Amino acid sequence: MRLASRMSLLGTETAFEALARAKALEAEGRDIIFLGIGEPDFDTPAHIVESAKIALDTGYTHYVPSAGITEVRKAVAFDAGRRYNREIPFENIIITPGGKPIMFFTILSLIEEGDEVLYPNPGFPIYESMIRFAGGTPIPMQLHERLGYNPDLKELENQITSKTKLIIVNSPNNPCGSVIPRTDLQKISTLAKDADAIVLADEIYKDFYYEGTHSSITEFPDMWERTIILDGLSKSYAMTGWRIGFGIFPDFLVEPITRLVTNSVSCTAAFSQIASVSALESSQQPVWDMVAEFKKRRDLLVDGLNNIPGIKCPMPEGAFYAFPNITGTGYSSEEFERNVLTQTGISLLSGTSFGKFGEGYVRISFANSQDNIREALKRLREFLSN
């Protein structure tokens, strides 16, 4: 049987493929240090787990409205309203099973053949995959190491055409750990308005700042009306397996996105939604403690990488990834990933997993213990010295 031709346009997320390869080696008895997959290594806080148990015991085991349980949408709207310093109607919140559906549904509802979408490169690989799948033309917005892994705004301006329909921004960024300066966000907002383009702002790492505070492109005039905010609980509350994300949508997209939810997943699991209220309304100390620990790991990792000949690593400002330049080692990105895994037992990701401008780099997640990071640095140093 032949697949539909559109399936050839659909990419993948290589982090899961790399994880499978590393797990296979581990099953053979190898000692593997996992620095590839992008999820916190912390347990979901106990009070959130308890909330889910209570929800299951009290009957939250059935279908709920496609856009989400009203109580949950109101909790998200209130929490986001405090963050963005504005009143956000709960009707503009749509709850989804994870953050990816926000990308998928947004792109499906807006993009068709002939439309161009600017997206960060290196960037989360599903952006480009979904753009192609929807029939659009992906235009890579290069993130430059010399600019702290941020776009050159003059380059960006020159990339915008009459066909530009959507601009994707991701700050803090996966895979680079970079943060777009507020002045740059303001310029991007002006470019978007001048082009009459919509912005998809992926802010899933908004709680992971090691210096400074979060800035959103929605802070600038007239941007709420043309911005979709992608967010969720997976990263901040160590809830990746709970599949609980949400989007904040302009009025004109609420009904179409809700219809896409109905046609695809029906709704998001009820007990996960109820548990998310406990996450948002309870003490945020577990989040702060996790970020404080990640900062220690970041400093340890970056200092260690910069003391290994052939590697230079800028200091990431957010998320939990480092994106070191490995051109001095003589390896390509894919060679580095493959050889480091097979010869040292360290699982990390080639920069090209995140687009063509990732060549010469690798992504290292520091969502692992300080002891394991020290051991990984020791193995890397020995590997490259040999």
Image (cartoon, rainbow, N blue to C red):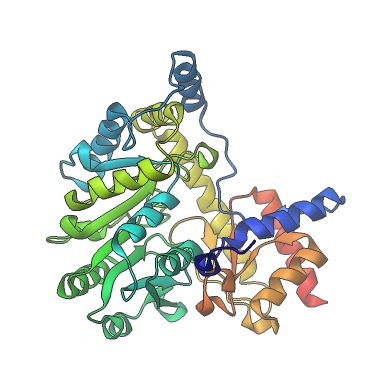
- Residue in the image at 63% along x and 68% along y: 305
The answer, for residue 247, to whether it is visible in the render is no
Expressed as whole percent of the image width and height from the top left, the position of residue 246 reads 35, 44
Q: Give the answer, above or below, for where 40 lies relative to 316.
A: above
366 left or right of 150?
A: right
Figure label count: 0
223 left or right of 59?
A: left
Q: Give the answer, above or below, for where 257 lies relative to 110.
A: above
- Residue in the image at 36% along x and 33% along y: 280
Expressed as whole percent of the image width and height from the top left, the position of residue 310 reads 66, 80
Return the residue found at the far right. Answer: 29
Return the residue found at the far top. Answer: 58
Which of 337/132 is in front?
Answer: 132
Expressed as whole percent of the image width and height from the top left, the position of residue 158 reads 28, 86
355 left or right of 158?
A: right
264 left or right of 302?
A: left
Q: Give the answer, above or below, for where 107 lies relative to 27.
A: below
- Residue in the image at 44% along x and 52% along y: 100
- Residue in the image at 71% along x and 54% along y: 20
- Quarter in which the C terminus is drawn: bottom right
Which of 115/377 is in front?
Answer: 115
Picture quadrant of residue 313:
bottom right
Expressed as whole percent of the image width and height from the top left, the position of residue 159 reads 31, 83
- Quarter in which the N terminus is drawn: bottom right
Return the residue found at the far left. Answer: 221
The answer, for residue 169, to whether it is visible in the render is yes
Picture quadrant of residue 259:
top left
Which of 19/339 is in front?
Answer: 19
